[in-house]
Amino acid sequence: MLRDKIVAYMVEANIIKENERKVYCFGLQLIEEMVFSFCIFLIIGILFGNVLETIVFFGAFAVLRQYAGGFHAKNFISCLAISCCIITTLNLLLTFFTDFTWVIILCAVVGLPAIFVLSPVDSVYKYINKDEVKKYRRRSAIILLIELGIMLLLVLTSKYSMAFCISYAWFVLSALLILGKYKNKAGTRE
């Protein structure tokens, strides 16, 4: 694979140490998966004619998810399948709704409090220690407030479909936080 060749070159060129090989291979694998996923999401957005909205959703979701945490799928294929369902649902809603006001309000009323109260939620794939909890909670709150400001600006400029994408990101993330908390309490942490 290309990532193995890149990492082998980095070891041979003394850029990294041999004992760091697995870490760098894993990091490159994550980058590959993220780029592939984003390309799939763009294709879905193109098929529905909602490319910009798909990007707005992905941006709002990904930035906040990094610090808020929540449920994680067991493997990349499961994650991609779930993500494609979420992106397709977003695009279906964008296609069939014309009045986003009540949907924005509903998603915000559900999503905002859940994220403020629950985040961060760790998982077996990303354990968060006590020091990180405080830092991640603060960062989640700051990002959420920035996104809220952007969403309000979008509403004031009558860009309701874009505002909906941000509130939908909050709604989806709140569901993943609740599911993550449930799985952690159930002892499965997956």
Image: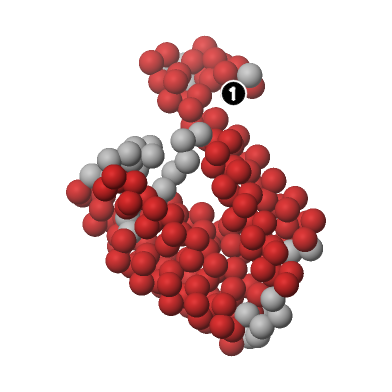
* Residue 189 place in picture, x, y as percent: 33, 40
Disc 1 crowd rating (10 Å Cα; few below 14, some 14-19, many 20+) is: some
For disc 1, the marked residue is: 3
Q: Quadrant of residue 54?
A: bottom right
* Quadrant of res 101: bottom right
Q: Is residue 46 visible?
A: yes
* Nearer to the camera, 88 or 31: 88
Q: Say which amino acid is labelled 1.
A: Arg
Instruction: Left or right? Give the position of 142 relative to 108.
Output: left
Q: Considering the numbered disc 1 on the image, is that residue within a helix, a strand or a loop? A: helix
Q: Is residue 89 left or right of residue 185?
A: right
Up the image or down, 68 lies above or below 38; here it is below
Residue 153 in view of the camera: no
- Image location (x, y in percent) of residue 120: 32, 55
* Relative to 179, residue 189 above or below: above
Number of callouts: 1
At a point 50% along the width and 77% down the height, the residue shown is 106
Residue 134 percent coordinates (x, y): 24, 57
How is the protein colored in the picture?
secondary structure
In which quadrant is the C terminus drawn?
Answer: top left
Residue name at image x 48 percent, y 66 percent? 171
Observer-nearest of 118 and 60: 118
Q: Quadrant of the N terminus?
A: top right
Q: Residue at 43% x, 69% y: name it.
A: 111
Percent coordinates x, y for residue 130 in the rendering: 20, 49
Q: Reply above or below: 190 against 120.
A: above
Say which quarter of the image contains residue 116.
Answer: bottom left
Task: Kindly give the residue lying farthest to the front in the view shown.
Answer: 186
Above-or-below relation of 49 to 62: below
